[in-house]
Image (cartoon, rainbow, N blue to C red):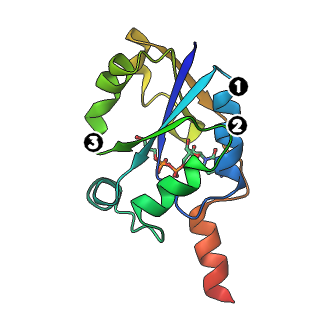
Amino acid sequence: MRKVITYGTYDLLHYGHVKLLQRAKALGDYLIVALSTDEFNWNEKQKKCYFSYEERKSLLEAIRYVDLVIPEESWEQKISDVKEFKVDTFVIGDDWEGKFDFLKEYCDVVYLPRTPEISTTQIKKDLGKK
Ligand code: C2G
């Protein structure tokens, strides 16, 4: 069984997220999503999520491509996650191009093109205008 892992905040879930997860799952048979906790988002990414971790987790678990959701609590957990879950491929959007090449020692590393026209930030901006 080929295992794939990806990481993210996934707030205000939209089709750009789903297309990433769909392509990630196509790289293997089992997809793990390490979902940024509310604390990690605020302390490390200065993101205040609209939906809580539990709400974001339940949305991701409803997606057919997602097999397991685990918490992302630190930048440093990726190597131990890859080892613990025997991951074959790490995948993430190409806005992170090159940032996780250190994982190549442990698994394949794939950066996928983002869906350009949509983002959680853009959604918030557009809704703010209405
Ligand atoms: N994404 C995408 N297209 C978009 C928006 C997002 O392909 N229009 C992808 C991102 O590249 C990422 C995933 O969807 O792979 C989740 O996006 P975010 O929730 O913004 O994740 P991010 O804050 O980049 O967190 O340790 C890594 C970080 O936790 C990644």
Horizontal side of 106 relative to 31 (left or right) equals: left
Horizontal side of 71 relative to 21 (left or right) equals: left
Question: The disc labelled 2 sits on which kind of residue?
Answer: Gln
Q: Which of marks 2 and 3 is nearer the N terminus?
A: 2
Quadrant in which the N terminus appears: top right
Q: Residue 74 carries which label?
A: 3
| Residue 33, above or below 103 | below
Using a 10 Å C-alpha cutoff, classify the residue at mark 2 as few (fewer than 14 neighbours), some (14 to 19) or many (20 or more): some
Q: Distance between the residues labelled 2 and 3?
A: 25 Å
Mark 1 highlights which residue?
26
Q: Nearer the viewer, mark 2 or mark 3?
A: 2
Contact (Cβ within 8 Å) of mark 1 with mark 2: yes
Question: The disc labelled 1 sits on which kind of residue?
Answer: Ala
Q: Which mark is residue 22?
A: 2
- Under circle 1, the secondary element is loop
| Residue 94, above or below 3 | below
The residue drawn where x is 58% and y is 38% is: 93
Question: The disc labelled 3 sits on which kind of residue?
Answer: Ser
| Residue 14, above or below 69 | below
Q: Distance between the residues labelled 1 and 3?
A: 26 Å
The residue drawn where x is 70% and y is 32% is: 23
Q: In which quarter of the image is residue 71?
A: top left
Q: Which of marks 1 and 3 is in front?
A: 1
Q: Position of residue 6 (x, y in %)?
A: 50, 34
